[in-house]
Amino acid sequence: MRVVCLQHVEYETAEAIATWALERGHDFETARPVFEDYPSLDTFDMLVVMGGPMGAYDDASYPWLVSEKAFIRKAIDSGRLVLGVCLGAQLTACALGGSARRNDVREVGWFPARLTPVGRESRVLSVLPREMVVGLWHGDTYDLPAGLETAMVSDACPNQAFEARDGRVVGLQFHVEWTPEALEALAQRHGEWFEEGGPFVQTREEFLDPGDALGRGRELLFRLLDEMETLR
């Protein structure tokens, strides 16, 4: 299988997803849509769309978002597997006909997310535990188009995951792909979020010391990707 990752900024990488792909004998390639042309649809089987500090709704400030959402839609309509993470989930929701907006509060740190009844019956997301501690770093959320319902929720955000096209399209607002290096990079780049605080914003120390949640997240990421792979 050939996996292409759209990476928006240098510190929001898909290193763990690349590790999964290489361990499974798949090809993995990173594209930078902000600066490069999009890959041809016939060059990949799975599209991964990563995070970034921009808003999925901010087309005026980031005009390339328009073409990226159109590209994601083409990938979906062509039957490619699509996994969106954080900003990538919001862009994927928009590509499906939904929208993105500010969430009521920021979520920064490690908090539980729960499968909804829809999630527990879903094709792919049902392989995850009914409740799990996930990494979160976002101030935005998405609204799903008519016909789709949220698959996971948290106390601070009703949209933590969704599934479409019988599991071929998955969006995760949370992070199970983080590495220790990714945590350090986020804390360094956007440390003001800790200072500004909020009811669902942990301290820098809590964020950088997630215990076994990081390793557990990678296990669950691999489980989810293995399930998606069966659909190609």
Image (spheres, rainbow, N blue to C red):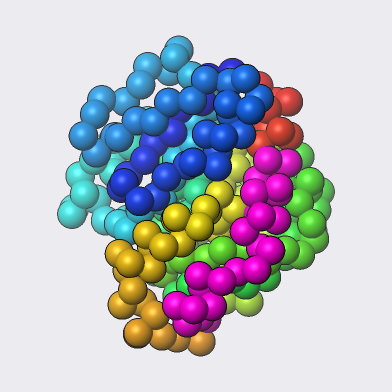
Q: Residue 188 sits in which quadrant?
A: bottom left
Q: Position of residue 79 (x, y in %)?
A: 57, 23
Magenta segment includes 206: yes
Image point (30%, 47%), residue name? 9
Describe residue 203's horizontal placement relative to residue 161 as left or right.
left
Task: Indicate the quadrant containing the N terminus: top left, top right, bottom left or bottom right.
Answer: top right
Q: Residue 33 sits in which quadrant?
A: top left
Q: Up-down: is 151 above or below 17?
A: below
Image point (45%, 12%), residue name? 42
Task: Indicate the quadrant containing the C terminus: top left, top right, bottom left or bottom right.
Answer: top right
| Closer to us: 135 or 164 | 135
Q: Position of residue 60 (x, y in %)?
A: 18, 53
Q: Up-down: is 163 above or below 159?
A: above
Q: Position of residue 174 (x, y in %)?
A: 56, 58
How many marks are shown on the rendered structure? 0
Q: In this view, which residue lies farthest toward the top?
A: 42
Question: Please, what is the dominant secondary structure of the magenta stretch?
Answer: helix
Image point (51%, 87%), residue name? 199
Image point (76%, 51%), residue name? 128
Magenta segment includes 50: no
| Closer to us: 80 or 211 | 211
| Closer to us: 96 or 105 | 105
Q: Look at the image and give the residue range highlighted in magenta.
A: 200-223
Residue 198 shows in this picture: yes
Q: Position of residue 177 (x, y in %)?
A: 55, 49
Q: Up-down: is 21 above or below 14?
A: above
Describe residue 180's horizontal placement relative to residue 220 as left or right.
left
Residue 92 shows in this picture: no
Q: Up-down: is 43 above or below 158?
A: above
| Closer to us: 100 or 46 | 46
